[in-house]
Image (tube, rainbow, N blue to C red):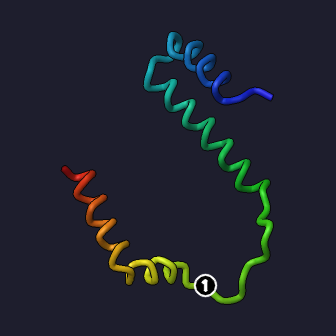
Amino acid sequence: MWSAGVVFPIMFSQLVGKLGFGSTLQIMAFVCLLLLFIGIFILRARKPRTVGRPDVLEPVRAAWENPAYRWLLVGVFFGFWG
């Protein structure tokens, strides 16, 4: 099976000389979008849906109550910021 690491460079090198850089990138983006939609419509969920909506933020709230976790977040924030 062809991977994107083979197909996209070949497609890029063939199209950029004929259509230009901008049009080539648009065509490649539409190919990605087409493949994305094919994957969305073909794939099915493995788990059945739950009846009620689960609280997905509950683990985040529980972790936020831990002081060590809060200080870790502050340190990471200032580490990336400065």
Q: Label 1: which residue?
A: 54
Farthest-out residue, top:
17
How far across and down, in percent of the image, does residue 9 sit? 59, 20
Up/down of 14 relative to 77, above or below: above
Q: Which quadrant holds residue 50?
A: bottom right
Q: Residue at x 70, y 55 (%)?
A: 40
Q: Nearer the viewer, residue 79 or 7?
A: 79
Q: Give the left or right position of residue 5, taking residue 57 as reference.
A: right
Q: Name above or below for residue 41 compared with residue 16.
A: below
34 w.r.t. 51: above or below: above
Amino acid type indicated by mark 1: Pro
Label 1 element class: loop
- Residue sticking out furthest to the front: 68
Q: Residue at coordinates 61% horizontally, 84% vertically from top-left?
A: 54
Which of the 4 quarters of the picture holds residue 2? Answer: top right
Is 48 on the left or on the right of 12, as rendered? right
| Residue 59 coordinates in the image, percent (x, y) | 51, 79
User: In the image, what residue occupies the spot 67% across and 23% down?
Assistant: 7
- In what quadrant of the picture does the N terminus appear? top right
In the image, residue 29 lies at what x, y percent? 55, 36
Relative to 36, does residue 71 appear above or below in the rendering?
below
